[in-house]
C-alpha cells in the first residue's frame, strides 16, 4: 500500500492516488476466497473444500475481486487516508481506476477537507445590548395565563359557539358525495380558533348553536398528507352536540392562595415581575452574544464546503428525533402532523446550521491564533463533569465522545471567552 500522489482539485477537495501492489492484492483475493469457499458447492468436492483455482475456472478469474477490493478499502485505503494531515469532513469518494493480478489495484480517493480560514479584528467587537423593560401588561399576561390553567370547562346553552370555545361535534366528510376514510368521528372536542383542522373548518362552526345540524365546505391544502384529498374540495356534515367554555376563577387573594405559594395578589405580581426582569436580562445577554458572533462571522473568510452544513443538519435532525422518541413519537408521525416532507423539515434547520458551522470555524481559527492549549488534566476534568451530569461512568463518556473531540471543544470554549471578554458591550 502506498500513497502515490496528492492533487488539489479546489479549495476544499483533494484527489489521492493510492496503490496496492500485486502481492497485497493477491493476499486480499486469497482472504476473500477463504471466507467465501464455505458457501460454494463444486461437484466432486465437499462443501467448502473446492480449491480456489477450480472455483476461478468455473466462475471466472475475477470471482473474488469485488470482495478483495472491499476488504482493501477497509484495511488499507481508509487507514492511509486517516494518516494524512487533512481534516476530512465527509466520507471519501473511492473509485478503482485499475485492477489486475500483475500490477495490483489503484484507487482514486476524493476527500473534502476543512477550509482554510482567515480572521482578523476579533477582539474589541462592539455590540449593543438592550434589556426590555417589564410592564404591568406583561405581568397581567402571566396572571391571565395562570387563570387559564386553573379554569374549568362549563356547558354553554344560551349562546352560539365562539372562538375559544370547545365544540363537541359529530362529523363526516364527503368527496364527490362519497364518504372518505378517516373523515368521521363522534363527540369530537374541537377547540375553535386552534387551527387544528382543515383551513375554514372551524370558522364555519362559529355562530352555530347546540343541536344544529349543518354542512360546511372546505378545500384541503395542496400539501395535505393524504394524496387523494390534497387540493380537493370536500364537504362535512356536522352536528353540534355541545358547546363548552372555559370559566376562569376570580382574581383575588383566595385564588392566589389556592393556585400559588403566595398569600396575596400583590406578592404574586411582585414575584412575577422579578422573574420577568431576570428573564429579560438573560434574553438581552443571549441577543448580545448573537450579535457578537454574527459580527465575528463577518470578519471571517472561508470557502466552506456544503457538506459541512449538511453534516450539521444531520446532527440537528438526529437530536430532534431523539427528543421526539422521549415523547413517544417518531419522525414519520411528526412529518405527517406538520404536513412536511423530510426535505422541507431539513430546510428549517438550514440557517441555524450554517451559523453554527461558521461560528465554530471562526473560533477554531482564533484558538489557533491565540495558541490556546488544553491539558490532559482539563480533558479528564471535563469528562468527569459530563459523566456526573448524565450519571455515566468516565469510560462510558469516552466511548461516546473521544477525548480528542472534547479537547477541541474546550479550545473553542476558551476562544469564545477571549472574544466575549474583549468585546465592548453598550447597554
Image: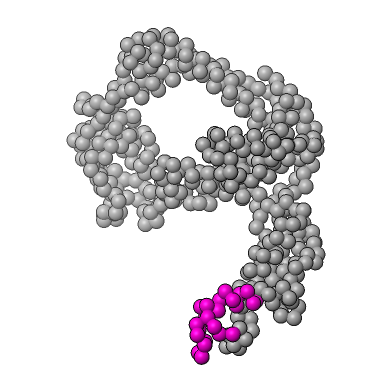
Closest to the observer: 1 or 233? 1
Q: Is residue 152 magenta?
A: no
- Give the side of residue 53 with respect to residue 174, left or right: right
Residue 407 position in % (x across, y down): 69, 40
What residue sits 66% from the left and 55% below the top? 90
Would you identify the image quadrant in which residue 180 lies? bottom left
Residue 372 in view (yes/no): yes
Quadrant into which the C terminus falls: top right
- Give the side of residue 95 with respect to residue 389, left or right: right
- Give the side of residue 193 with respect to residue 241, left or right: right
Quadrant into which the N terminus falls: bottom right
- In the rendered image of this protein, does residue 56 appear above or below residue 331? below
Closest to the observer: 194 or 10? 10
Residue 267 position in % (x across, y down): 43, 10
Residue 207 in view (yes/no): no
What residue sits 36% from the left and 14% below the top? 256
Q: Which residues are magenta?
A: 29-51
Q: Is residue 32 magenta?
A: yes
Q: Name the residue at the bottom extreme.
A: 44
- Give the side of residue 220 with respect to residue 134, left or right: left
Q: Name the residue at the left extreme.
A: 211
What residue sits 80% from the left and 66% below the top? 4
Residue 39 position in % (x across, y down): 51, 78
What residue sits 71% from the left and 42% below the top? 361
Closest to the observer: 344 or 306? 306
Amino acid at each position: 500500500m502506498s500513497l502515490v500522489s496528492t492533487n488539489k482539485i479546489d479549495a476544499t477537495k483533494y484527489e489521492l492516488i493510492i496503490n496496492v501492489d500485486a502481492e497485497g492484492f493477491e493476499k486480499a483475493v486469497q482472504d476473500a476466497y477463504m471466507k467465501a469457499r464455505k458457501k460454494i458447492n463444486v461437484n466432486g468436492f465437499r462443501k467448502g473444500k473446492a480449491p480456489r483455482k477450480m472455483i476461478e475456472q468455473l466462475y471466472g478469474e475475477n470471482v473474488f475481486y469485488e470482495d478483495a477490493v472491499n476488504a482493501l478499502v477497509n484495511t488499507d485505503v481508509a487507514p492511509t487516508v486517516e494518516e494524512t494531515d487533512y481534516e476530512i469532513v465527509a466520507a471519501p469518494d473511492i473509485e478503482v481506476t485499475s485492477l489486475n493480478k500483475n500490477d495490483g489495484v489503484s484507487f482514486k480517493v476524493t476527500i473534502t477537507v476543512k477550509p482554510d480560514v482567515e480572521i482578523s479584528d476579533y477582539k474589541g467587537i462592539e455590540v449593543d445590548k438592550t434589556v426590555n423593560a417589564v410592564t404591568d401588561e406583561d405581568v397581567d399576561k402571566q396572571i391571565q395565563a395562570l387563570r387559564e390553567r386553573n379554569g374549568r370547562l362549563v356547558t354553554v346553552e344560551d349562546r352560539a359557539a365562539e372562538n375559544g370555545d370547545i365544540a363537541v361535534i359529530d362529523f363526516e366528510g364527503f368527496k364527490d358525495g362519497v364518504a372518505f376514510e378517516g373523515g368521521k368521528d363522534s363527540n369530537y372536542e374541537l377547540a375553535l380558533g386552534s387551527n387544528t383542522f382543515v383551513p375554514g373548518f372551524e370558522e364555519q362552526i362559529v355562530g352555530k348553536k347546540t343541536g344544529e345540524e349543518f354542512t360546511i365546505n372546505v378545500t384541503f391544502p395542496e400539501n395535505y398528507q393524504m394524496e387523494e384529498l390534497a387540493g380537493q374540495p370536500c364537504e362535512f356534515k356536522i352536528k353540534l352536540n355541545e358547546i363548552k367554555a372555559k370559566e376562569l376563577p376570580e382574581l383575588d387573594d383566595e385564588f392566589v392562595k389556592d393556585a400559588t405559594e403566595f398569600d396575596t395578589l400583590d406578592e404574586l405580581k411582585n414575584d412575577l415581575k422579578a422573574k420577568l426582569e431576570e428573564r429579560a436580562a438573560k434574553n438581552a445577554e443571549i441577543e448580545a452574544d448573537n450579535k457578537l458572533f454574527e459580527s465575528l462571522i463577518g470578519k471571517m473568510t472561508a470557502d466552506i464546503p456544503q457538506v459541512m452544513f449538511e453534516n450539521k443538519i444531520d446532527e440537528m435532525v438526529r437530536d430532534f428525533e431523539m427528543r421526539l422518541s422521549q415523547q413517544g413519537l417518531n419522525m414519520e408521525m411528526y412529518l405527517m402532523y406538520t404536513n412536511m416532507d423530510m426535505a422541507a423539515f431539513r430546510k428549517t434547520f438550514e440557517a441555524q446550521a450554517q451559523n453554527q458551522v461558521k461560528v465554530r470555524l471562526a473560533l477554531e481559527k482564533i484558538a489557533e491564533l491565540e495558541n490556546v492549549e488544553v491539558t490532559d488534566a482539563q480533558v479528564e476534568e471535563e469528562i468527569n463533569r459530563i459523566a456526573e451530569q448524565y450519571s455515566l461512568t468516565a469510560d462510558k463518556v469516552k466511548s461516546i465522545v473521544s477525548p480528542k473531540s472534547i479537547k477541541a471543544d474546550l479550545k473553542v470554549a476558551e476562544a469564545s471567552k477571549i472574544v466575549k471578554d474583549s468585546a465592548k458591550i453598550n447597554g
